[in-house]
Amino acid sequence: MIINILFLILIGGLVGASSGYLGSFMVLKRMSLVGDALSHVALPGIAIALTFGINPMLGAFLALTIAIIGIWYLNEKSEGYVESIVGIFFTASLAIGILITPEPEIFEALFGDIDKVTKLDGLFIILGSILIFAITKLISKKLMLGIVSEDLAKAQKVNISKINLVYLLLVGLVVALGVKFIGTLLTGALVIIPAVTAKNLARSIRSYHILSIIIGLLSTVVGIFIAKMYNFPTGPIVVLVGIGFYILSNFIKK
Amino acid sequence: MNNILSVKNLKVSFDEHDVISDLSFDVERDTTVAIVGPNGSGKTVFFKCLLDLIKYQGEIKWSENVRIGYVPQKLAVIKDLPLTVLEFLKLKENNNTKIMSSISAVGFKDPSADEAGRHIHSDTRVLRAKLASLSGGELQRILMANALLGDPNVLLLDEPTAGVDIQGEKTFYSLFRELKKDKDLTIIFISHDSEVVKIYADKIVELKHDH
């Protein structure tokens, strides 16, 4: 029992920390709603995976990858109205997802069920988190330069479009890693809330990234602990703990 | 002829509308060229061509071994961006000595440096400041320091004093003069200010808004 809780806390913490790190860039890129919208795309992927008896995390990741490449391509090629097309696409995904998800699993897919997290899921999460940290660190300077000035980045021969695609695929990966814990409706919150909280407290970009990782980690660890103790669904508790940290940060903020 | 840049029959169109048409001129090494023209005449678009950021027709030919330092008009810096000046400069260059020398070059010098000019240290306070907290003039000088980090022989300045107060503008242009004196630099700058253009430019290229 204790080993099981420790296992869940470890891998939950990894998902929280990776979400916090990726989210710290997303907030500065003013893409806060993208994480939320992307998480909806995971639903049809989960539904198809459940129907065919595949790991839902894998289904979510495949659906997210296809959606991200599609959106990235639209953004590159189209000259207008991309935002509205993306909006329609995301809500359509949610509607289709709800329609095709087998009924007994719908609640689990939307809000997550921590008791269904297996050792294999744990392995995916550990490997996925390592990949997220390594690649994000590798592209972090280029990402930041693109945030400060796209022209300056391009003038320094940074391929902004490629960097954005890699970044969005990592966001897709972290959403897929989080679906079993938090569910598709709330994983976006785990990407955004720690970063917004960290922004209230940080004095430099380095401390901002570190705080975002720590708050992401703490939100999930404390959230899982409370959920397990009082037998609540994990997703909403993790998100509420994160929001608690956010409210607190507004009082500490200079 | 010792040209560092040659522009021939440059044409840029957006949606079949010509923003720049049939622009040709040369820039001699170590000279200062002002790009002038009314709003919408394609000055910033022309810089994007020089930096190879957009598609164009015609020819832009830089001489060999050209190293371009680019100072954009503004940054997309949000009010509470936690990025410090040092962290911003480190996005381009990790070497602290080079960073110190570039901020000294743009006028952030330690006021306690001795009179003989030996031991001139950089004013490191500015490095700890958040980029978003700088005044317009200070930000322009940091952008200039950023451009100098690549040891450029060409500087492209896009309206360097737009949104800068009069004092900041004075500081910026005295720096401009010093840089020209100390380094072998070709400077191409966009300006609205005809007085500034008269004082600093060796050559003026006027873009017209007649298309």
Image (spheres, coloured by chain):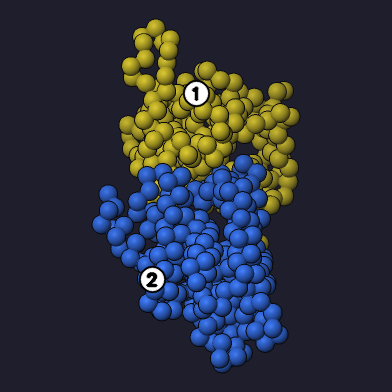
Residue A15: x and y in percent read 53, 63
Tell me, yes or no, if residue A60 can be seen here.
yes
- Residue furthest left as drawn: A251
- Colour-to-chain, yellow: B
Q: Chain of mark 1?
A: B
Marks 2, 1 in one chain = no
Q: Residues within 10 Å of mark 1 (few under 14, many from 20)?
A: some
Image point 52% across, 18% down: which residue? B182
- Disc 1 designates what residue? B101
Q: Is disc 1 placed on a helix, strand or loop?
A: helix
Question: Which quadrant would the N terminus of chain B be assigned to in this image?
Answer: top right
Residues under numbered marks 2 and 1 in contact, where contact means CB atoms less than 8 Å apart? no
Image position of A3 with respect to A253: above or below: below
Q: Amino acid at mark 1?
A: Ser
- Residue furthest top as drawn: B116
Give me the disc on residue A226: 2
Q: In the figure, what tint was chain A given?
A: blue
Image position of A110 with respect to A5: above or below: below
